[in-house]
Amino acid sequence: MNYLLDTHTFLWWLSDSDQLSRQAKKIISDSDNRIFMSCASQWEIAIKVSINRLTFPMDEMETELVKNGFELLNITTPHINQTTSLPLHHRDPFDRMLIAQAQSESLILISKDHIFPEYDINLAW
């Protein structure tokens, strides 16, 4: 199966947080699954680091992706276009991009976000 990590899911995975569900841990650790991280999440992390809302070694981002076997999902024109058809349940631009990417690429989004079920996407938590 193919999955897309929400930003908090990625961070909780790296920190081995108890906030990450058992199911999410099982999915991410299963080597038969392809796990994607959006560059939108990288951008979100970078912004939070720059405004001191998060501590993360940005220079180690690529290393963490490779070490964990995650694939980077770039933002494409179809992803951007998909955001224009999304209802405004969620106004966070990073989350809207993740939803658009999950829809466009037929990915299952691994997220705890309580608003995501309002969208036409497959979710795991």
Image (tube, rainbow, N blue to C red):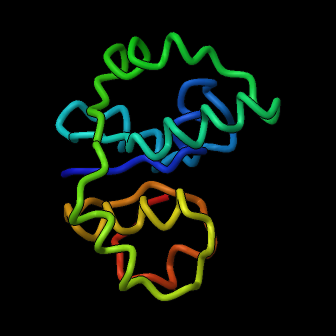
Is 54 in front, or is 122?
A: 54
Q: Is residue 36 above or below residue 14?
A: below
Which residue is depicted at the point 41% across and 67% down? 99
User: Could you say where residue 38 lies in the image, as x and y percent from the top left?
Assistant: 38, 44
The front one of 33 and 75 is: 75
Pick whichever, 74 or 109, lies toward us. 74
Q: How many marks?
A: 0
Residue appearing at x 39%, y 74% in the figure: 83
On the image, the x and y values in percent for residue 81 come to 29, 72
In the displayed structure image, the side of residue 52 where residue 28 appears, left or right: left
Q: Quadrant of residue 20?
A: top right
Q: Is residue 125 above or below residue 4?
A: below
Q: Residue furthest right?
A: 52
Locate residue 81 relative to residue 124 in the image: left or right: left
Residue at horizontal 40 percent and vertical 40 percent from the top: 39
Residue closer to the observer: 32 or 44:
44
Residue 45 location (% of width, % of height)? 60, 35
Q: Position of residue 94 (x, y in %)?
A: 53, 57
